[in-house]
Image (cartoon, coloured by chain):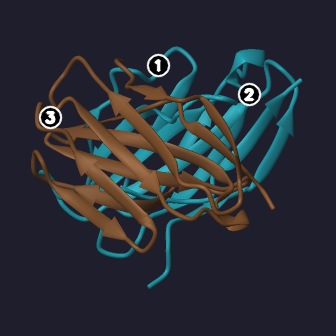
Chain colours: A brown, B cyan
Amino acid sequence: GQQLNQSPQSMFIQEGEDVSMNCTSSSIFNTWLWYKQDPGEGPVLLIALYKAGELTSNGRLTAQFGITRKDSFLNISASIPSDVGIYFCAGLRHNDMRFGAGTRLTVKP
Amino acid sequence: EAGVAQSPRYKIIEKRQSVAFWCNPISGHATLYWYQQILGQGPKLLIQFQNNGVVDDSQLPKDRFSAERLKGVDSTLKIQPAKLEDSAVYLCASSPLRGPKNIQYFGAGTRLSVL
């Protein structure tokens, strides 16, 4: 099935820096989701977006549902070492959810 | 509230052997999903159940994979016989509703190594 295009694939940043990652698709989705996966664990939901143009925050995380309904962005401000992990975007349409390949984030103290 | 429970956490088998994974969803969640996550990739849906009925199994390799959710609660996923390319993490997820707010909650997964 179609997967989403997520970028960048990986990021190496210094503690305290801001991070941006995005996800695009050729198809429209009704809901955009951002998950974080730590090693040996399943994905954990960070933010859910339900309307085009919606901007939602969860602590230092901010995500946006693109106007075209074909993309979404996740920003992390003032990164800390525990932000390390793999971030996945997911698009949901008619009970069908597709995932991006993930962005692997490394934070150097 | 207890999360999605999966067992075993790890399994190592030889090719051509059989293996089964178990999942217990969050209490009250009607929808249950099995995903395959190959190293370096996002999860890929294998099968989706609504109560004890199959909603989508279009990406399940039915010649070797099977899944059931007989009583509409817990579920098992079986691979018989296993191939080397089946090495992956098998994730189970559940969700309470259908529609745009049908958020999926994941278990920790079962890591399968086929030698």
Q: Is residue A43 left or right of residue B110?
A: left
Amino acid under disc 1: Lys
User: x, y percentage for residue B26?
Assistant: 41, 71
Residue A28 x, y percent position in the rendering:
15, 28
Mark 1: secondary structure: loop
Tell whether A34 sits left or right of A95. Answer: right
Q: Residue at x 50, y 73 (%)?
A: B3
Task: Report helix, strand or loop for mark 2.
Answer: loop
Which residue: 67% across, 56% down? A38
> Is residue A41 at all visible to an observer of this figure?
yes
Q: Amino acid under label 3?
A: Arg
Most foreground residue, B108 or B29: B108
Residue B13 position within the rendered picture, expressed as x and y whole percent measured from the top left: 85, 33
| Residue B103 seen by the camera | no
- Dot label at residue A69: 3
Q: Nearer the viewer, residue A98 or A102?
A: A102
Q: Do discs 3 and 2 share a chain?
A: no
Which chain is home to disc 2?
B
Q: CA distance from mark 2 to mark 1?
A: 17 Å
Q: Amino acid at mark 2?
A: Ser
As measured in the structure, the alpha-carbon distance from the residue carrying label 3 to the one carrying label 2 is 34 Å
Describe residue B14's horizontal placement relative to residue A86 as left or right. Answer: right
